[in-house]
């Protein structure tokens, strides 16, 4: 149950927080990401059609992406061949894109590790509070001492 809760809360954070890259995403990255999305199905990407549509429009308009949107686009790019990206005769461009994909992925991993730790800490704290509350409910009730003064 805690694992499922962790996954749900982590996913919620990824969808809510914006990706703040160490280096701005290049125009080539945006163009290649759009191309990569057009060469992959939502099922391959592990997201809904609506998610892909939202990511596509964010990429096309060069909007800042959420952590989740970035992950989907970057993973799509990472899995595309030079031919799928229309770069089969432009190896320098392809290698530059793949280097950017790798660098951005490392930065994303660092950013999401902090989120993972925060989510896990919150869940642990809540569980400790629930545990403590369950013990106080079971504490024996002390009767007041009635005495003469």
Image (tube, rainbow, N blue to C red):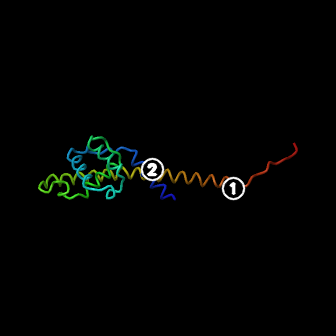
Q: Badge 2 local density, few (<14 within 10 Å), some, or many (20+)?
A: few
* In the image: residue 114, left or right of residue 131: left
* Residue 25 quadrant: top left
Q: Which residue is mark 1?
A: 138
N-terminal of the pair, mark 2 or mark 1, is 2
Determine whether the residue tagged by mark 2 lies in a helix, strand or loop. helix
> Gap in Å between the C-alphas at discs 2 and 1?
31 Å
Question: Relative to the observer, which residue lies in front, 109 or 13?
Answer: 13
Residue 21 in picture, x, y percent from top left: 30, 45
Residue visible at 36% across and 53% down in the picture = 48
Q: Position of residue 122 (x, y in %)?
A: 49, 50
Write the residue at 28% across / 52% down.
Answer: 74
Question: At which x and y percent is residue 35?
Answer: 22, 51
Q: Name the residue located 59 percent from the left edge and 53 percent from the top edge.
A: 130
Residue indicated by mark 2: 118
User: Does 114 sit left or right of 121 as displayed?
Assistant: left
């Amino acid at each position: 149950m805690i694992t499922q809760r962790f996954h749900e809360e982590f996913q919620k954070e990824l969808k809510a927080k914006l990706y703040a890259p160490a280096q701005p995403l290049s125009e080539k990255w945006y163009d290649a990401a759009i191309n990569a999305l057009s060469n992959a199905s939502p099922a391959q990407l592990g997201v809904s059609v609506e998610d892909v549509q939202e990511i596509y429009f964010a990429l096309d308009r060069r909007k800042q992406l959420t952590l989740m949107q970035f992950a989907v686009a970057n993973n799509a790019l990472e899995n595309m061949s030079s031919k799928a990206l229309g770069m089969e005769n432009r190896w320098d461009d392809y290698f530059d894109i793949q280097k950017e994909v790798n660098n951005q992925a490392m930065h994303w991993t660092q950013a999401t590790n902090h989120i993972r730790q925060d989510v896990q800490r919150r869940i642990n704290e809540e569980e400790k509070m629930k545990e403590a509350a369950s013990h106080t409910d079971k504490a024996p009730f002390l009767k007041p001492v009635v005495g003469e003064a």
